[in-house]
Amino acid sequence: MRIFDFFRKDKAPKSAFVQEYERLFEIKIPSIRPIRQLNFVVIDTETTGLDAQKDFIISFGGIKVSNYSMNLQSTRELYLDFQIQNRESIKVHEIIYPIKSIPLKDFGKAVLDYISSDIIVGHHIGFDLMMLEKTLKSFGLKKMLNPVLDTQYLAIRLEKGPHFDFSMAKPGEYALDNLCERYGIALDDRHTAAGDAFLTAQLLMKLLKVAEKKGINDFGGLFRKL
């Protein structure tokens, strides 16, 4: 009986908000859709640590980008109700216990409603996606279905080419701080979910302009190797 209970944990029934989210992907984005007509959602998460198995999300931040501009009114910052604290992570994000935190289910619904079917963008976005999928697993979400664009990879691709060996890069060369400095972006409100999303959104717009100059001007080109 214990074995069956174990497997049931991986097969949680889908909540209505997860089903609604998954229905958004019945129609795919046409490869010829111009970049300026694409909708991006730039996200970031602050967590208790960097172990996707043991740590958990504290806050989620995001901002929407379309037509090479940010929609400042679309900015979101959500705090997940939590009580376990990690002294080392507090030194980075300085969140002790947010007043406006929300329960897990409300957090999950708000995040999926906000992300919708937009192209997810982030710096080292793989970790954020793992944490979101882990957080929403109990509501029946198996995988985020959005197209995903990592600004670190996009910067490497545009500056070095798609076959560049990342191990050959200088230490920190493609860290968010260094890229922001290289592209003339002021480092404000660093290490908050909303602040880092805002910085990454500015970097995205700079990189999309570089991509356009290289002849990358539609969805297919953006997700196809140079």
Image: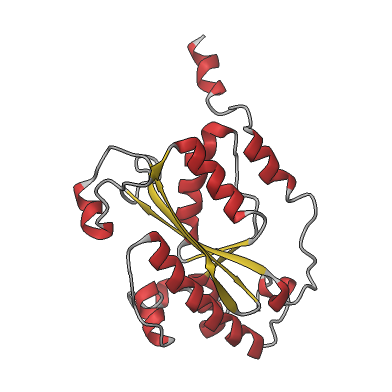
Q: Quadrant of the C terminus?
A: bottom right
Position of residue 33 in the picture relative to residue 59 (left or right): right
x then y, percent, for residue 45: 42, 55
Which residue occupies 45% across, 63% down? 124
Q: Please determine whether, in this image, residue 140 is positioned above or below residue 122.
A: above
x then y, percent, for residue 132: 49, 47
Which residue occupies 49% across, 56% down? 126
x then y, percent, for residue 90: 23, 53
Which residue occupies 53% across, 83% down? 206
Q: Is residue 68 visible?
A: yes
Q: Which of 119 and 214 is in front in this view?
A: 119
On the image, which quarter does residue 212 sit in?
A: bottom right
Q: Can residue 164 be seen in this view?
A: no
Residue extending farthest top: 1
Q: Which of 50 and 29 is in front in this view?
A: 29
x then y, percent, for residue 69: 58, 78
On the image, which quarter does residue 94 sit in?
A: bottom left
Number of marks drawn: 0
Which residue occupies 67% across, 74% down? 222
Q: Please determine whether, in this image, residue 121 is positioned above or below residue 164.
A: above
Image color mode: secondary structure
Position of residue 19 in the picture relative to residue 80 (left or right): right
